[in-house]
Image (cartoon, rainbow, N blue to C red):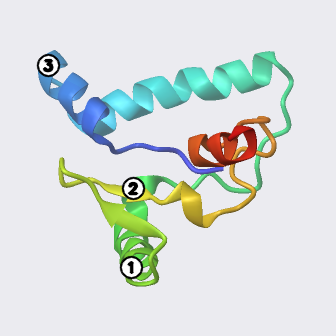
Amino acid sequence: MNLTDIEDKSIAIAQKEGKTITELTQYYSKFFFEDMDTLELLPADVFPKASEHVPEMIDIIKKMMKNGYAYRGKDGSVYYDISKFKDFGKLSHLKLRWERRNKTG
């Protein structure tokens, strides 16, 4: 289970509160682990931090884009192309809009 300890919203909140991103994410991680204990959830074997694997994530994103599974949005962000995954939404019983339209006419 990864810990998303770096992302745009957290960076903005840390700046607004005059904290480093590390201070902010350590604070919330503490509560996350306390909540897991309270709920008596079994911990994952490892809890890697996203910030410790940025180069690997960049490589994966580049490969996904190269192979047509991701695309750059108008805002400059990279998005996973859910239309490339035929079972997307299966667990949550969601259907893609184009799929729903094609089945209903």
The type of residue carrying mark 2 is Tyr
Q: Are marks 2 and 1 in contact (CB under 8 Å)?
A: no
Where residue 8 sits, quadrant-wise, is: top left
Q: Which residue, given by chain and number where applicable, does mark 1 sit on?
A: 59
Residue 30 position in % (x across, y down): 54, 26
Q: Which residue is mark 3?
A: 16
Callouts 2 and 3 close, C-beta under 8 Å = no
Q: Is residue 4 above or below residue 55?
A: above
* Image point (23%, 23%), residue name: 13
Q: Is residue 10 left or right of residue 28?
A: left
Q: Quadrant of residue 25?
A: top left
* Mark 1 crowdedness (10 Å alpha carbons): few <14, some 14-19, many ≥20: few
- The foreground one among 53 and 66 is 66
Q: Earlier in the sequence, mark 2 or mark 3?
A: 3
Report the amino acid beneath label 1: Asp
Q: Which residue is mark 2?
A: 79
> From the viewer's perspective, is 33 left or right of 13?
right
- Using the image as rendered, state which of residue 72 and residue 52 is in the foreground: 72
